[in-house]
Image (cartoon, rainbow, N blue to C red):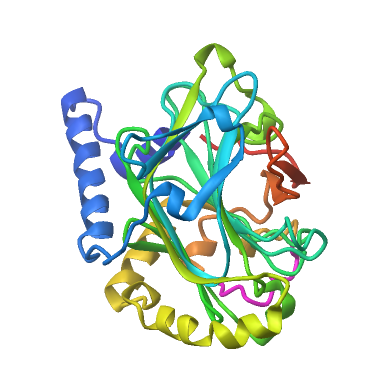
Amino acid sequence: MDEVRSCGKKLCISSSSSRRGIILTSLGLFSVVFFTLTGAAAAFNLATIPFDEGYSPLFGDGNLVRSPDGRAVRLLLNRFTGSGFISSSHYNHGFFSANIKLPSDYTAGICVAFYTSNGDVFEKSHDELDFEFLGNVEGKPWRFQTNLYGNGSTSRGREERYRLWFDPTKEFHRYSILWTPNIIIFYIDEVPIREVVRSEEMGGDFPTKPMSLYATIWDASSWATNGGKYKVNYKYAPFVAEFKDLVLEGCPVNPIQEVQTTVACAEKSAALEREDYATITPERRSAMRKFRQRYMYYSYCYDTLRYPVPPPECVIVPSEKRLFKETGRLKFGGSHRRQSRRRNRPIVTATTVSDDLSDM
């Protein structure tokens, strides 16, 4: 579907042109977009840690494989179980990051998630920040979504969905979540793709309680690909997601001691806000705008079926609004609630929104 749409807007040439010309034009456009997004972004200065220094298995222990040097891990999904890991501590704000490579070939029905949550402690009032990568049938690309919940606001999903400007199965790319008392930024490599600024109007919907970092791979056949039309096919198993160069920057705390936590972590939170990745420079903001205009294909802010009045934090950008129809037609998996070390896969509270688009 995207190839047809792109051809209609950008790449159609006269019938007398050769196939080679079409390919060169497509590659040229890709190169322009890629270098426009990445050219202004210098690499962050990040301190990585070994897996066992900051994380432990969450479920599917036999499907979690550490690298010989202990600095990388592979998560496997087979017909028996998925797998996942969790940070050893809860963090009162932080920068959470990893280089990730996704499974290749037929991956329909698969969800690879990299996210923060405190659902293990605050089951009815949890907070959450998500990267969720959604598999596809062979020959069609992975897509992904970001989301956030605050204080158990699972009935008010804040999903956005996107395509990527690269093949995430060919090489590693860095995915990062910055969470401070005042701002949330999702990054791919050094390109910011989404910014949420805390406002009074959001109230408790802005995450405030300490969270752990999670990474999982699991069977999301009921919703992940075309609204559940395409399921996981285990003849292609095992499906392998790889994580390396892990980063945990934040203030480790006891999540129950909220008052002491706020005081003790004030200095660390201030230090986070002074880091390079906490500032969206004009160059980064330009890259974010171009990413969102080219690769975002759903935003809750423009979904008038779910939200006739946009939620208070939404900033309506005319150039973005023109990309979307008046109503949304996607299906979402909802929140990663009630994570447990004893479960074979995450329990996810479903949020269905009309019928799913044939979104690539």
Instruction: Pick out the residue farthest to the top.
Output: 235
Query: What secondary structure do most residues of the magenta stretch adopt?
Result: loop
Residue 185 visible in this rendered orientation of the protein: no
In this rendering, the answer to whether 238 lies above or below 119 is: above
Magenta span has 316?
yes
Question: In this rendering, would 297 be left or right of 21?
Answer: right
Closer-to-camera residue (4/142)? 142
Residue range highlighted in magenta: 307-317
Residue 281 visible in this rendered orientation of the protein: yes
In this rendering, the answer to whether 229 lies above or below 39 is: above
Quadrant of res 68: top left
At a point 42% along the width and 78% down the height, the residue shown is 272
At a point 31% along the width and 33% down the height, the residue shown is 170
Quadrant of res 167: top left
At a point 21% along the width and 51% down the height, the residue shown is 32
Residue 276, position as x, y percentages in the image: 31, 76
Residue 14, position as x, y percentages in the image: 24, 32
Question: In this rendering, would 344 be left or right of 20?
Answer: right
Quadrant of res 122: bottom right
Residue 77, position as x, y percentages in the image: 56, 26
Closer-to-camera residue (301/196)? 196
Closer-to-camera residue (273/60)? 60
Image label count: 0
In this rendering, the answer to whether 284 lies above or below 352 is: below
At a point 69% along the width and 53% down the height, the residue shown is 327
Residue 25, position as x, y percentages in the image: 20, 38
Instruction: Pick out the residue farthest to the right.
Output: 124
Magenta span has 159?
no
